[in-house]
Image (cartoon, rainbow, N blue to C red):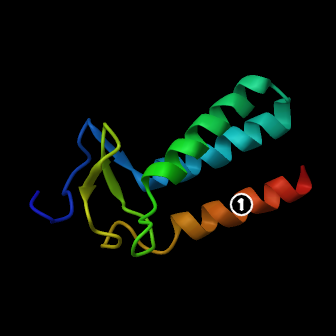
Amino acid sequence: MQGKQPSQVEWDMKYWWPHCETIYALLLAYEITGDKKYEHWFNLVHEYTWEKFPDREKGEWFGYLRRDGSVQVNLKGNHFKGPFHIPRFLTKVITLLDTM
């Protein structure tokens, strides 16, 4: 890839947006059902996501990780990764937590 954006989803890549959507979905599932398994998985995915995706030095999130959690591509924005998923995810999670 040599620093260029991936042109396709590869089997071993982790993308930022499914993690955002998964965190919200697990929190919503827990809120609706009260089932502790959703709380457990929410905590696991939340911790992993906040540990691996944010760029602590320069801000924003990396969009593409390898399966082992290392950064695949240093890009933080491109024609796939824009300013939608992360702010939406944060807003929805905060709003849901406030109602819980």
| Quadrant of the drawing holding the N terminus | bottom left
Percent x, y of residue 35:
80, 25
Q: Could you tell whether 60 is left or right of 91 in the image?
A: left
Task: Identify the residue at horizontal 65%, vertical 63% (top origin).
Answer: 90
Percent x, y of residue 89:
62, 60
Q: Is residue 58 above or below residue 22?
A: below
Amino acid type of disc 1?
Lys
Quadrant of the rendered image containing residue 64: bottom left
Quadrant of the rendered image containing residue 34: top right
Helix, strand or loop at label 1? It is helix
Q: Could you tell whether 61 is left or right of 80 in the image?
A: right
Q: Could you tell whether 5 is left or right of 19 in the image?
A: left
Percent x, y of residue 44:
59, 35
Percent x, y of residue 13:
29, 43
Label 1 crowd bin: few (<14), some (14–19), many (20+), radius 10 Å: some
Task: Identify the residue at horizontal 39%, vertical 75% (top origin).
Answer: 58
Q: Which residue is mark 1?
A: 92
Task: Identify the residue at horizontal 42%, vertical 73% (top origin).
Answer: 82
